Image (cartoon, coloured by chain):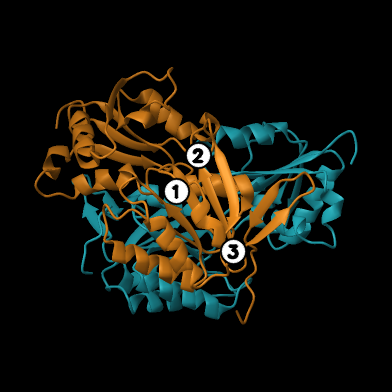
Chain colours: A cyan, B orange
């Protein structure tokens, strides 16, 4: 478009602690002239990283994506900042949606777009307790902002019936207080009441909490907007170690005849 | 056990390029007196990392786990090295299985065990093409070494029927030449022939290849032991950009009535 072709890189900071943010992402942040993202995520970018920061509200993803692409079309080096992995329920799809929109996409024809992955919340939560995602698993968002609740229910039931471990993102919000309980109820139709359930909030950040309970007690968990919930399969096991730590893992083997 | 309590840390190197290995993992490798892992994974650890290297064959995971725990029980600082995320079809479960085995676990009662997550192959592959994992997805290993093939089929069908994006690990081996084709056939019973399928091999390593085809042509893909395959959902879209690059993404919205 001009002699100064812009670039947009969608980056994931990982779960929260700087030690889990990849060098590739730190390099992209360092090279950026502009950082675009939800305010609290931008606040996690080290203060030593330069570039103009453009914080936005969490609900403005499409507008934020267009603004970021416009900056890049002007020749800027733009980093779009997500927490976790930008490819998992985050900004990478929002950017791609704009690149796919025939009403606007020609504006950004000359913008290079790249995505740099990061460790997502489910992986960080799993690592804290052992290896609950060590066998086949599903990742489902419980939010019905962007998909019908009937689809959420259908997917939770399918995952439970096929004995996947299930990672639930967005399990709760003020506008959706009952959906998590309903999801646990649906899982319980296919899974024993003693199935391990892990609720992990703010892993790698101040105030981290990781709780392990049985499915029958899951609705008593303190589940919030920044919680990820992992529901074990029929083979997921809990080990109490001598030092008092609780290990949760899913074996690599799956038995015949179950 | 002794005044020198040992520690075992299970680490994931990420997909292959050093820029995607987290600082936490690099720190753990640097602190290790002993590195245990499948030979080719140990070869990815930077030569500057000290410590005695104990390479093993890929099929000896239980024996490798016990050997690593024994070293830690002797007071060594042991890093067990996986590629990708050690919590996803990798060594973290193998270690936890040993901690759960009443015949042997008391030997390691005093060993501190930690898991450090990494970016797994499906995330690296997704980032290369855009955001195919941007909506609900499943992760399934096609290997029937450790679970009955009937269970694999049941899970692929459940994931396809519930319209999950599907990430397939271990899609092929010399001993399992037909399973990938069968999985594509099963998906095809629930998904359009034009559904995008991505085959990514050695992402971030020399010889990286990433191919995007339609489901009807998926069996012609060059799928090997180090390939991860991503199968789109009904909403996954392909965008051909002006610079010739192909973007594949799954929108954040899911329509009602589908």
Q: Position of residue A214 (x, y in %)?
A: 30, 67
Classify mark 2: residues with Cα within 10 Å, few (<14), some (14-19) or many (20+): many
Give the distance between the C-alpha atoms of the residues marked 1 and 2, in whole angstroms: 9 Å
Q: Mark 1 near mark 2, Cβ–Cβ under 8 Å?
A: yes
Question: In the rendered view of the protein, which quadrant contains the C terminus of chain B?
Answer: bottom right
Question: Is residue A124 depicted above or below A178 in this figure?
Answer: above
Classify mark 3: residues with Cα within 10 Å, few (<14), some (14-19) or many (20+): many
Q: In this orientation, which residue lies closer to the viewer: A207 or A250?
A: A250
Q: Position of residue B244 (x, y in %)?
A: 74, 45
Q: Position of residue B213 (x, y in %)?
A: 59, 55
Residue located 66% across and 57% down the image:
A93
Q: What residue is disc 2 on? A: A20
**Numbered-mark total:** 3
Which mark is on residue A124? 1
Residue located 89% across and 33% down the image:
A3
Q: In this orientation, which residue lies closer to the viewer: B28 or B232?
A: B232
Label 1 sits on a secondary structure element that is helix
Please name which of the two marks, 2 or 3, marks the residue nearer to the observer. 3
Q: Is residue A79 left or right of residue B107?
A: right
């Amino acid at each position: 478009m001009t002699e100064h072709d812009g670039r947009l890189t969608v980056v994931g900071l990982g779960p929260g602690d700087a030690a889990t943010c990849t060098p590739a992402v730190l390099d992209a942040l360092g090279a950026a002239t502009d950082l675009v993202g939800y305010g609290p995520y931008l606040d996690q970018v080290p203060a030593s990283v330069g570039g103009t920061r453009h914080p936005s509200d969490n609900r403005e993803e499409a507008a934020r994506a267009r603004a970021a692409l416009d900056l890049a079309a002007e020749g800027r080096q733009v980093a779009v900042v997500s927490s976790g992995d930008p490819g998992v329920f985050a900004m990478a799809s929002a950017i791609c949606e704009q690149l796919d929109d025939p009403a606007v996409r020609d504006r950004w024809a000359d913008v290079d777009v790249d995505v740099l992955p990061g460790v997502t919340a489910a992986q960080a939560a799993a690592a804290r307790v052992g290896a609950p995602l060590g066998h086949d698993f599903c990742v489902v968002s419980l939010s019905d902002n962007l998909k019908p609740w009937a689809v959420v229910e259908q997917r939770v039931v399918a995952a439970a019936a096929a004995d996947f471990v299930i990672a639930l993102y967005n399990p709760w919000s003020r506008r959706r207080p009952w959906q998590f309980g309903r999801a646990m109820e649906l899982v319980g139709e296919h899974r024993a009441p003693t199935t391990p359930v892990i609720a992990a909030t703010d892993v790698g950040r101040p105030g981290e909490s990781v709780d392990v309970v049985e499915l029958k007690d899951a609705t008593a968990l303190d589940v919030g907007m920044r919680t990820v919930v992992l529901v074990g399969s029929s083979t997921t096991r809990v080990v109490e170690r001598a030092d008092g730590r609780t290990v949760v893992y899913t074996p690599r083997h799956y038995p015949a005849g179950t």
